[in-house]
Image (tube, helix red, strand yellow):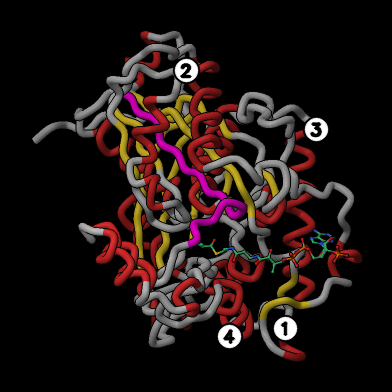
Amino acid sequence: MTETRKVAVVAGNRIPFARQDKTYRHASNSDMLTAALNGLVDRTGLGGQELGEVVAGAVLKHARDWNMVREVVLGSKLAPTTPAYDIQQACGTGLEAAILVANKIALGQIDAGIAGGVDTASDAPIAVNDELRNVLLDLNRAKSLPDRLKVLAKLRPKDIVPEIPRNAEPRTRKSMGEHAALTALEWGITREAQDELAYRSHQNLAAAYDRGFQNDLITPYLGLEKDQNLRPDTTVEKLAKLKPVFGKGETATMTAGNSTPLTDGASTVLLSTEEWAAERGLRPLAYLTHSQTAAVDYVKGAEGLLMAPAYAVPRMLARAGLTLQDFDYYEIHEAFASQVLATLKAWEDPIFCKERLGLDAPLGEIDRDKLNVNGSSLAAGHPFAATGGRIVAALAKQLHESGGGRGLISICAAGGQGVVAILEGSNR
Ligand SMILES: CC(=O)CC(=O)SCCNC(=O)CCNC(=O)[C@H](O)C(C)(C)COP(=O)(O)OP(=O)(O)OC[C@H]1O[C@@H](n2cnc3c(N)ncnc32)[C@H](O)[C@@H]1OP(=O)(O)O
């Protein structure tokens, strides 16, 4: 059996995230991913070089983008002999891509690779319905003009109605927000606590820009230099005035301010062995040491849609021999403030930890001052597949800047799944 090798996170690059239908309205997934990738290649001096693999994906993509990541590499500054392919695990895509690249490096199958993700809420794929698709396929097969006219005669006005993607679970027909609202109710997550978390996300991201933390994590794109959703001037009072958008009646607590906005953007991360990095004059920022996925049965209502990380994290901690408190930083993706708070509450709850996680004692509280210290998705926005890369790169840089330490990454994903990982600073 091959001995595993240490996997370094060497650098990351993303484009600023834009709000839906704003600056990147006319940019495709491929355009944005190419911009993020080329920014990383420029920063690390990898132009013209062949890498082990580039692995990335998008949650929402057009049928024509069936081989998107390979096409992006062919149009990028990397050598065209770099293999590349698409993966998709909803909002876990970016982190899962990093785990896949890391595992290949650890096993000695590649020495270096780039993981990434991209999504556009502006250029969402609109599909034709089954009736029109069948007519178009028959039309393509028809050999003569009369045959084609016969096929076209089958077309009815209702067949032209397009299928617009909905931000909803196919099995429940409920949106992510509606699911999260049920979990917020189950766990008694207050409006005040959600607004406070959202406020802190904006404050922390604004502070990260102010101290230059983002300078070598972001390449401006189409004139945008900062995340377009960031509101440094938001306050808990302003947030408290927003109308609820998910949930029903008096119990509705989720607003546009404490939910992620629909977003466009792309991110990339370079991972490699220490030797590969050293040969190119690059230094590890941190190491990706553990990862885990979990899934919950949200369809029958056994668990909340976005609660899978609550299961994945303790499984990973058990394998790593760590407790929830053994971390200097916690990066919990903020799909919704309520989902972050429900996850934290679940880990503190003796009954949840005993009955659902099978633990003798609760995982306990975390130090909230260590949570999302440079802001997270409520402030930056959440282009689904790009969020993992944003988090891996920012946490690795934070660990490097702090001279070491350990960070936990937790990402909830559609389909009731969760992807989590641990980064260790270079002093461990
Ligand atoms: C997919 C996975 O695998 C897992 C996941 O991550 S699940 C998460 C997936 N993501 C989602 O589901 C996205 C959810 N978000 C949405 O659907 C929409 O953003 C939303 C329905 C929540 C809001 O949409 P919207 O109404 O168009 O928002 P928007 O117009 O920007 O904001 C509404 C108001 O709030 C205000 N506002 C928003 N954020 C604010 C803030 N932080 N401070 C102050 N005001 C704010 C806006 O200024 C706006 O005010 P006006 O009406 O006066 O202009």
Q: Taking 406 as reference, is 279 above or below it?
A: above
Residue 143 percent across, percent down from the top left: 20, 57
Left or right position of 76 against 208: left
Circle 3 is placed at which residue position?
A: 210
* Element carrying mark 1: loop
Q: Which amino acid does label 1 sit on?
A: Ala
- For the point 37% across and 75% down, the residue is 153
Query: Could you tell me which quadrant the C terminus lies in?
Result: top left
Label 2 beta carbon less than 8 Å to ligand 1? no
The first of marks 4 and 1 along the sequence is 4
Circle 2 is placed at which residue position?
A: 283
Query: CB of mark 4 within 8 Å of CB of mark 3?
Result: no
The first of marks 3 and 2 along the sequence is 3
Nearer the observer, disc 2 or disc 1? 1
* Element carrying mark 4: helix
Circle 1 is placed at which residue position?
A: 252
Query: CB of mark 2 within 8 Å of CB of mark 1?
Result: no
Q: Say if residue 416 shows up in the picture.
A: no
Provide the residue span drawn in magenta.
112-126
Q: Taking 254 as reference, is 221 above or below it?
A: above
Nearer the observer, disc 3 or disc 2? 3
Query: How far is mark 4 from mark 1, CA to CA?
Result: 12 Å
Query: CB of mark 3 within 8 Å of CB of mark 1?
Result: no
Residue 117 within the magenta-colored segment of the rendering: yes
State ligand 1's quadrant: bottom right
Query: How far is mark 3 from mark 1, CA to CA?
Result: 35 Å
Q: What residue type is labelled 2?
A: Arg
